Amino acid sequence: MNEIIKICGVALIGLAATAVMRGMKNDWGGFVGIATGLVLLFFAVGAMYPVLGFIEKITENSAFSVYVETVVKAMGIAVVAESAADICRDFGESAIGARLEFAAKGLIILLSMPVIESLLSLAFGVRE
């Protein structure tokens, strides 16, 4: 419960600071917003470590460990790319943000190719 209060506090303080800066027509408002977003992202990543440790523990001797590892990596790529694309949009560069998200989707597809290959070989093996 304390973590969410800290996270909300950081978000509200960053929001207030950004609003004040932008209200004063100060160019630093965007940077304050980005800094706040990065701090929140680090909070979120820190909160994920116990979850990742738990997932690793329950899948380490499983045949599904490759699949779970791929899903976790794909989620990491998606979170990082979305955060970076949002920063691009905050600076008015939505085209760069969109291309970044497209590149991340391509990386996720590339990352998942061994899983797709395994599922297809399983499907064709069952079919025969």
Image (cartoon, rainbow, N blue to C red):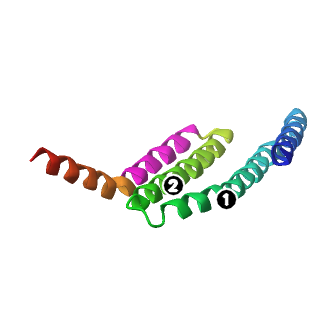
Q: Is residue 31 magenta?
A: no
Tell me where residue 53 appears, x and y as whole percent.
61, 62
Measuring 90% from the left and 36% from the top, which residue is drawn there? 20
First-in-chain label (2 vs 1): 1
Chief SS of the magenta region = helix
Q: 126 or 13, which is in the foreground?
A: 126
Q: 51 or 15, which is in the foreground?
A: 51
Give the tally of numbered discs: 2
57 displayed left or right of 29: left
Residue furthest bottom in the image: 61
95 displayed left or right of 41: left
Q: Amino acid at mark 1?
A: Pro
Could you classify mark 1 by the number of other residues whose Cα lies within 10 Å: few (under 14), some (14-19), or many (20 or more)? few
Q: Which residue is mark 2?
A: 72
Give the SS element for disc 2.
helix
Disc on res. 27: none
Q: Quadrant of residue 102?
A: top left
Tell me where residue 107 appears, x and y as whole percent.
42, 54
Disc on res. 50: 1
Give the SS element for disc 1.
helix
Tell me where residue 46 appears, x and y as whole percent.
71, 58
Tell me where residue 85 appears, x and y as whole percent.
59, 45
Image: magenta residue range = 94-109
Measure the alpha-carbon separation of dots 2 and 1.
13 Å
Measuring 51% from the left and 40% from the top, which residue is drawn there? 98
Could you classify mark 2 by the number of other residues whose Cα lies within 10 Å: few (under 14), some (14-19), or many (20 or more)? few
